[in-house]
Amino acid sequence: MSLLQMEQVSHRYGSQRFLSRQTERTVLQDVTLTLEAGTCLGLLGRSGAGKSTLGRILLGLERPTAGRVLFEGQDIYRTTANDYRQDIQVVFQDSFAAVNPKMTAGQIIAEPLTNFTRLAPDALQHRLVTLIEQVGLTRADLAKYPNQFSGGQLQRICIARAIATNPKLIILDEAVSSLDMVNKALILALLGELKDKYDLSYLFITHDLQAAQALSDRFVILDQGQIVGEYPTRKAFVDATDPHVLAIKNAMLATHPRYRTIRK
Amino acid sequence: MKPVLSVERLTVETIADDTPLVRDVSFTLLAGQIVGLVGESGCGKTVTSLALLRLLDEKVIRQSGRIQLDETDLMTLSDRTLRRVRGGQIAFIMQNPMSAFTPVYTIGHQLIETIRTHDRGSKREAKDRALEALREVNLEEPDRILKAYPFELSGGMLQRVMIALAVCLRPDVLIADEPTTALDVYNQKLVLYYLEKVRATYGTAILLISHDLSVIAEMADQVLVMRHGEIVERADVFDLFDRPQHPYTQQLLAQQGIQAGGMNA
Amino acid sequence: MNIPLRRPSLLHRLSNQRLILIGCSAFLGLLFLAALAAPWLAPHDPFLVNLAVKLQEPSWTYPLGTDHLGRCTLSRLLYGARVSLGFAVLIFASSLLIGLLIGTLAGYIGGWVDQLLMRFCDGVMAFPSLILVLGLVGIFGPGLKQVIIALMLVQWVYYARMFRGLVMTLKEKNFIAAARVNGSSHWKIFRTHLLPNILPPLLVIGTLEMGWAIMDISAMSFLGLGVQSPAAEWGAMIHEGKSYIRTNPELMIYPGVMIMLVIASFNLLGESLSERFGVTKPPK
């Protein structure tokens, strides 16, 4: 049994959004994909392709208009049990928007722990210290507020929150896209390390080819709400020549001025 | 050739405890040149760009040095004259295009007003110029874009609208602070492409601030590497990528290599 | 990192924020205390009619003189503060609670619930408050209760719309999504994530609205719709004093100055709080 299966999932947003002219907009169309335990699936696509909506559906935040989402064989929108919540966590792109500005790092990381577990206060404190050190910060950082951290540090706190309850799957929604190159490399390394250590699975939603390749074993390309390409191995992806892969590869910038294409 | 913008020993400190945010930054920009300013977040890149336009709160921050734009020293100008310089002679493109527009007015209203504050002319003329500029950055249906509100457009589109505005006002200098960081890779390339088009067509000098070495590799002539508020290395872009001198530059390039390695594997 | 940007606001440059904040809070605080302690502070019974001492100049016995019925003006001002401030707080608190409830529900749930509640609000908004007061007064006769109910019925809509907007903006932030992923109940999300982030704007709007509530009560009383004589209330005092505007203008000036000072203080306080918290006032 796969860890996660999406079967024929379609999603439409109703009217009364910003443009009243549009009555309905199809965001996802018959999306079917599976994710095996212990792997990382890279979900690539341009902004507006429906990647984030797909993530929200998997997180149980948005009931799809059609189709099923099975986590460990159980349809998360048909079950009354909320067990899956503990097992599926998320790291968002903008870490500053992903934490409550009025809470300390300690309170932020403690939120899932107090909701899902019954730890005594000192056990909780102990767990918080373990978690924050795990992501490369210190015990003293627990008392700080979000505006005292840099974007990279705050993303580490979000990762600590995501791994707090030992989840099975973490959805990385553009988790490294707004970090600078130094932090991007460090966070990718941390995510790789945590994946091995805790046998985590990732769904890595991103438009960043380099970041996706650093972590993923399999790749899927989403375009205009539909899956337009599936690549079972890294090699298959690198060798692929279909227009969707080429579009991504062409959008990559040169790594050395010798190869540059915009200025000649 | 005489530089359009020359900055000498620009230093920015907090008044409260003299913390230096930017120290002794000097560089020049020639017409049609792109100078890349690269460094990690928090190294002082954005403070530098805001200091150039004297946009920092001078009650909190002390700023010294010379910022020479053509014949005038920006450090000596009054608020009133500065406002005319900003957006007129120097245009600014920032990371988050959404915050560059007021959400309550249409794009058209804001473009036309901005054009008219800098060049006298009728509404009609301003609108025609705006439409023409939007076409120049290949935005489809420019009429509809003028009628749209900022939140109805994507980040990539808004950033192109910002470039269109720069096209209208023909500034001598364009400061682009992480113009593509909030965009996906597809839009990133488009925005950079149109920046280059503006440079090539109008000879605009561009200060391109980025944490992404690939953006610098694609665009820059000269590169300044900034760390902890200081320029640690300055070099021609080819020299910098081929023979980085400073250990910090070498480290940055190595980190870029790790990611690029993943791509070419 | 927080980069200090140049602020364009004129008010910011002209005024010393801290001084305003402290000055206005101190004035309003003292006034509230004085209103609470009116029975002990007032030198005379504010309702005691004594035609022998009518329209007196200020003296040691009557620090601000007396009105046309020989009642002590200072005592009446103090008791008037109880009515004005007290009922302003009441209107503010009750319309705030209703607004908070309805606005938060509409913003958080969204969809048809939001549509329904907001259309209802539009309906209420379309109904001018003055007409509502006149209607209630027409049915139940003039009185403070009618005015307060009318103001409450109208005021909550503004709060509801404001809270809806705030909640909708917050809901878009991913920390609300993260809280749900982390198993927090809706009630917990409301308490720990929404409310603390709504509080600063609430404080700002609250102070500004208090000024308006006082203005409204006084205006209604001045028109003879609200507080009825012999009750002491600033608007009503101006109303009564207007017959003596030529001979004894101070009968109108004292309560008028009080109303002006209180409203100005609330407004300045609101402005400086909004600067401090970086809250932009939603347009009314």
Image: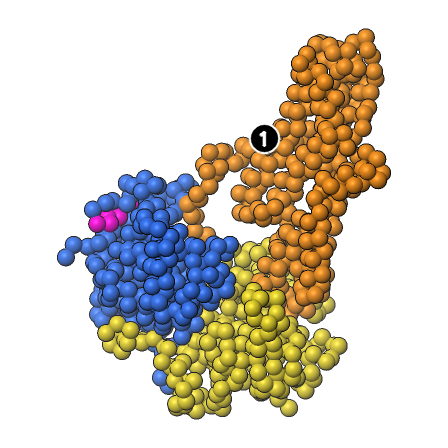
Chain colours: A yellow, B blue, C orange
Q: In the image, residue B86 lies at what x, y percent?
A: 33, 50
Chain bearing tag 1 is C
Q: Residue shown at 37%/77% (left/top)?
A: A251
Query: What quarter of the picture does the N terminus of chain C occupy?
Result: bottom left
Instruction: Using the rendered image of the protein, determine whether residue C1 is visible from the camera's viewpoint.
Output: no
Q: In the image, residue B251 lies at what x, y percent?
A: 33, 69
User: Which span is picked out in magenta?
Assistant: B64-70
Location of residue A64 by image quarter: bottom right
Q: Residue shown at 64%/47% (left/top)?
A: C202
Residue type marked 1: Gly
Residue A42 or residue B228, whichever sits in front: A42
- In the rendered image, residue C257 lying in the magenta stretch gets the answer no
Residue B168 or residue A88, whichever sits in front: B168
Left or right position of C82 against C168: right
Left or right position of C125 against B225: right
Q: Residue shown at 58%/33% (left/top)?
A: C22
Residue B237 or residue B54, whichever sits in front: B54
Instruction: Using the rendered image of the protein, determine whether residue C270 is visible from the camera's viewpoint.
Output: yes
- In the rendered image, residue B65 lying in the magenta stretch gets the answer yes
| Residue annotated with mark 1 | C23
For residue C274, above or below residue A102: above
Left or right position of B201 against A62: left
